[in-house]
Image: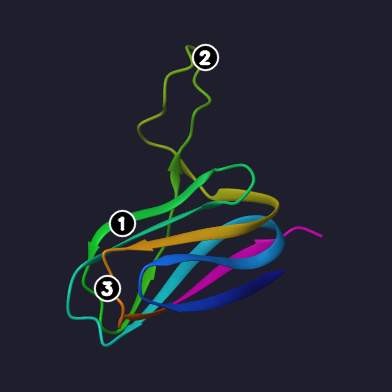
Amino acid sequence: MIQSVSNSRTGNGTMYIGSRLRGRILAIKIVAGAVTDNYDMVLTGETTGIAIFTHANLTLSTTEWFYPRRLADDQADASISTDCYVEIPVFNERIKCVITNAGTAKDVAVTVIYDSET
């Protein structure tokens, strides 16, 4: 079942999105208001630390969509595949969102859309 969770923050800091999410990340929607400078954003699984999204120097002032995927790592020699991307899983955890270089007056709302496993 496709679901979404959101949170918003003003300025630098850490926010948490959802609670006990379980499924695969499909898309991330970022809505930034009054942003005039670049800022950085990193999303990870809170307990597993799995990398979901990293972007430096975002200059968004409108709605922007991202579709994070990771290279598959199932080669016989343990090397990373260069042509196969997979959706990013989360398992019973919140998503940790760290925003830096945003100053104090930048409003940012983040929505994560995921395919939940029940």
Q: Is residue 117 magenta?
A: yes
Is 87 magenta? The answer is: no
Residue nearest the viewer, comparing 75 with 111: 111
Residue 42 % position (x, y): 40, 55
Q: Which residues are magenta?
A: 109-118
Helix, strand or loop under label 3 = loop
In depth, the one of 23 and 86 nearer the eye is: 23
**Rendered view: 28 above or below 95:** below
Q: Is residue 86 above or below residue 7?
A: above
- The location of residue 23, given as percent across then percent down, is 68, 56
Q: Position of residue 25 (x, y in %)?
A: 56, 58
Secondary structure mostly taken by the magenta-highlighted segment of the chain: strand
Report the residue marked by disc 3. Answer: 103
* Residue located 41% across and 28% down the image: 81
> What residue is shown at x 82% (from left), y 60% (from top)?
118
N-terminal of the two: label 3 or label 1? Answer: 1
Instruction: Give the amino acid type for the residue marked by disc 1 in the picture.
Output: His
The residue pinned by badge 2 equals: 76
Relative to residue 63, is residue 9 drawn left or right? right
Q: Which residue is mark 1?
A: 55
What is the total number of numbered labels drawn onto the structure image? Answer: 3
Nearest to the eye among marks 2 and 3: give it: 3
Q: Are marks 2 and 3 in contact (CB under 8 Å)?
A: no
